[in-house]
Image (spheres, rainbow, N blue to C red):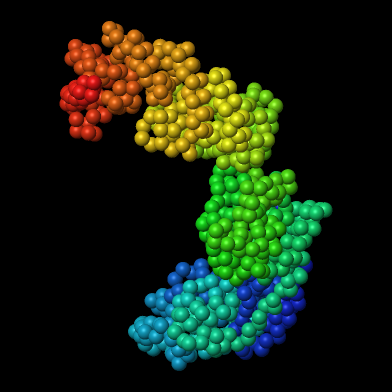
Amino acid sequence: MTHDFHGDRPIGVPRDDRFGLAVIAERVASAIREQSAGNGLVLGIEGAWGSGKSSLIALIVKLLKGGDGDSVAIVDFAPWLVGDRDQLLVSLFEELSRSIDAIAQAGGDSTGVTVAAARSAADQLRRYATYLGPAGKLVGVAGLALPGMGVAGKIMEGLAAAAAQNVEGPSLSSRKAAIEKALSELERRIVVVVDDVDRLDPLEVAELLRLVRSVADFPNVTYLLCYDGERLARAVTSAVGVDDGRAYLEKIVQLELTIPRPETFALRRMFSDGLATFAACDGERGQRLAHVIDRLGGRFFKTPRVVNRVLDALRFYWPAIKGQVDLADLVWLRILAAGAPATYRWVEEYVDVCAAVATGRATVDSEERTEFGRRLDVALEADGLSWEATRRELHLVLPAMGWSAGNEQRGDGRIFNNAGQESGTAARRLASPDHARLYFALARLPGSVDLADIDALLSAAQKSREAANGVLAAMAEERGPTGDSKAERMLDQLRNLPSERLANTDPINLSFAVVDVADRLVGAADEEWGQPRPWLYGKQVLASIGRAVGAEQWLRLTDELFTRAPQIGFLTHVLRDDTFDHGVYGDRADPGDATGDREQFNMMREAMFERYRALGIDGLLGLARPASALYAWSQAGGRDEVVALVAQRTEGDDSALVHFLTTLTGTSSLDPEGVACFFDDVPTVLQRLRDLADAGDAGAARVIVAISSSLRFRNVSIAAWIEARRAAETASDSDDGAEA
């Protein structure tokens, strides 16, 4: 089903009139027809933008054309299409001349009087325009210029040029008199319609008004000027330099008819009738929709244009998201966008953040709440609103809205009040984290995660390990526009999910699924060095599960997970990261970032050591990320065991040594201190490598380059490092001997 957009088009027939404009149009048209032929008239149709001026003009023109059609000719003059304000006179006179030509072509009486008069008037107009502007400039009639006229010099230039070209010709005033006589004899009134005068720039407004008053004030010519009085007065004040733009207009516009303000009831009824042609709801939703139209529509429906803008927006949005959102909330939002744009923009940001909080992607602290509250007040003030006047509507539609301002410690209590709480999901409300984006963007972001996805994963984990693995595996194949997978987004949200939600599923099944997908997302092709983002998220998810289930259950879960999970790449990352967090290795201890306490760390360490022993050095070298496992084993407390195994594997086997050290090499460097995790006598190992490189071993040469690259940052050569290290070891041995 298709729907026609209104597009702010004026009505064209009386049956479409909802605000009494047809009656006004009949009376204006009648007055124009009965006007004395000897006089011109400038009639202003005044009203706010969108109040119906163009519709009234359209009805007037239709009546003038449809009545005694031979008595009125219509000239639709669009000065904003001229482009150069200096050409306004030429353009207007050409339009008048064409209209008179049309009168001549339409025929006349049996004596041909009308035809002759029309041809005479058209000829006189064209000559007059040429005489006024021989250089194509707008000029005025001597003695008729108004205050502030900025083209006085052009008048003199035009008159001088005309005199130079035709010294013996008739004067300017006599030419105008000839036109007036011809138009008086025309027996046909010409109505010049100029809509949206106030949309011209100020200088164009001034030129048009001077033209109408001083140059083209002819008999049998009526000007219908449409404008917003306040806007037009400001433009005149700016362009002409007078103190009172309204007073200036009164010298030009002889009669002014103000469009009556539409009744609020009629505007709301217009909206309801228009909405009913393409959308409807009943029951409780229907009652809320009626409330929205009465309350919000009553506040913001000021003109028919606002109503049509909201209806057009709904005609655009509704077919795309019908059945996926709540109609009453959508109507509320589109009315707000039209009537309170600053508040609308705040609402868009607010519901987006609420959705992020509800799905675990973000948190909001007291300072952020206070800042959001301050910006709400700024937005309301910009739209002429206040919290007291709007809080009920905001509370009924938006998520996590409170009633009071709160305090400095908690932040603004009006907003983010239990923002993590699900709201309106089943009814597809604007407050629903799963549906909020649809109200603004018409579609969910590909690969995005909503509460339904989280519920599906938690439900699957409650059933079985295989079901949970299947859900995350499918998400791993679904990619978003930035290339990241839906599974990665899921890990991002799970890490901040409230503990009570994580506790309401099977934590073991969920943990196994997290480990499986983390390894799935970080394959062998990924760079081994650094911290892959899915592993960062995955570790934080495990920590969240640990907090949710408690220390005792987390110990049991850790033992099963690190002992039995099929893949060990991600688990190795967790072990090594916790090794640093607990201060077992390195100098950046931060236990708060660990997945558990020291007892839990010891349990995971022993479990992983058993798996490393089972694989042996060759088995570890065959892993997708071997260096991580080797470093994890050594740095977590197994160095002596690892050193012995590496020595056993590489002693006397140069190719095994080169292969092992190549495995440890990152993208371009290898720190000798890292080599010390696997060898007791690092200087001897490095010298051995140098000898192999000198003998032409390409692999050994690459390792030497990597080590040199690492030492270059310290401005140290390999030879100097070896010498310094041996000196330090000798000094240490001497100290040990003295103590003995």
Q: Residue furthest right?
A: 283
What residue sits 62% from the left and 39% below the top? 499
In x, y percent, where is residue 439? 64, 51
339, 407: nearer the viewer: 407
Q: Residue furthest bottom?
A: 143
What residue sits 53% from the left and 71% below the top? 199
Quarter location, residue 462:
top right
Q: Is residue 138 visible?
A: yes
Q: Quadrant of the C terminus?
A: top left
In x, y percent, where is residue 451? 65, 41
Quarter location, residue 635:
top left
Quarter location, residue 228:
bottom right
643 vs 226, left or right, is left
Q: Is residue 203 above or below residue 289?
A: below
238, 659: nearer the viewer: 659
Q: Is residue 410 above or below residue 691?
A: below
Q: Is residue 58 visible?
A: no
In x, y percent, where is residue 277? 76, 55
In x, y percent, where is residue 17? 75, 69
